[in-house]
């Protein structure tokens, strides 16, 4: 029959007696046990999403307006790419465009998506902001 030992004795046999039990990151409640496979002590897991990235500009400096329907259930979406601003500035531009066009939209991966085909209105507003605009796609 196997002998029962305490947790402290077991850790000492493994060579971990010099580390305190709560040596992990106190901010997220995880201990630094690299052999740990599964634990329920941290509660609900959250996705470790990185910081939101802003848009990237094209080499010619123009903003592209592209009308898309493919893969969107037949609905027309206008994508605006090539605006090299932070994520917060892209969200602000998107919200103004949604109000001007009276439609929905979102910012995904540095690209503004507007749920309507209002290229003329959007082009006029972006020209007022100082962007050079090119139409791309259908």
Image (cartoon, helix red, strand yellow):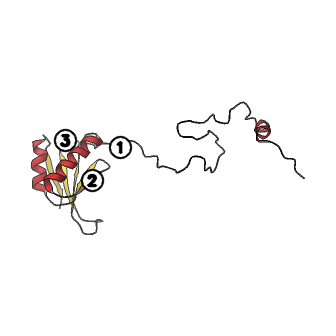
Q: Nearer the viewer, mark 2 or mark 3?
A: 2
* Looking at the image, residue 32 lies above or below residue 97: above
Circle on res. 19: none
Disc 1 target residue? 52
Q: Alpha-carbon distance for marks 2 and 3?
A: 22 Å
Q: How many marks?
A: 3
Q: Residue at x 24, y 55 (%)?
A: 105
For the C terminus, the quadrant is bottom left
Disc nearer the start of the sequence (2/3): 3
Instruction: Identify the element where label 2 is drawn.
Output: strand
Q: Are marks 2 and 1 in contact (CB under 8 Å)?
A: no
Q: Secondary structure at mark 3?
A: loop
**Circle nearer the N terminus (1, 3):** 1
Say few, some or many: other residues with alpha carbon within 10 Å of mark 1 (under 14 / 14 to 19 / 20 or more).
few
Residue extending farthest to the bottom is: 74
Asked if residue 92 shows in the view, the reply is yes
Q: What residue is drawn where x is 10% and y is 44%?
A: 127
Q: Which residue is mark 2?
A: 106
The image shows residue 39, relative to residue 89, as above or below, that is below
Say which label, 2 or 1, has the lower sequence index: 1
- As measured in the structure, the alpha-carbon distance from the residue carrying label 1 to the one carrying label 3 is 22 Å
Write the residue at 24% across / 41% down. Answer: 89
Image location (x, y in percent) of residue 64: 19, 50
- Residue 83, position in %: x, y? 22, 44
Frontmost of labels 1 and 3 is 1
Residue 137, picture quadrant = bottom left
| Residue wearing tag 3 | 61
At mark 1, the secondary structure is: loop
| Distance between mark 2 and mark 1 Cα atoms | 13 Å
Q: Residue furthest right?
A: 1
Judge by depth and name the residue closer to the eye, 64 or 8: 8
């Amino acid at each position: 029959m196997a002998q029962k030992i305490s947790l402290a004795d077991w850790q000492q046999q493994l060579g971990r007696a010099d580390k305190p039990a709560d040596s992990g990151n106190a901010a997220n409640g995880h201990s630094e046990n690299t052999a740990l496979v599964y634990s329920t002590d941290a509660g609900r897991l959250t996705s470790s999403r990185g910081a939101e990235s802003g848009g990237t500009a094209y080499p010619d400096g123009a903003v592209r307006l592209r009308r898309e329907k493919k893969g969107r259930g037949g609905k027309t979406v206008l994508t605006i790419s090539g605006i090299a601003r932070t994520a917060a500035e892209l969200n602000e531009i998107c919200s103004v465009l949604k109000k001007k066009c009276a439609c929905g939209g979102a910012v995904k991966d540095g690209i503004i998506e507007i749920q309507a085909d209002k290229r003329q209105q959007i082009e006029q507003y972006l020209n007022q902001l100082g962007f050079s605009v090119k139409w791309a796609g259908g």
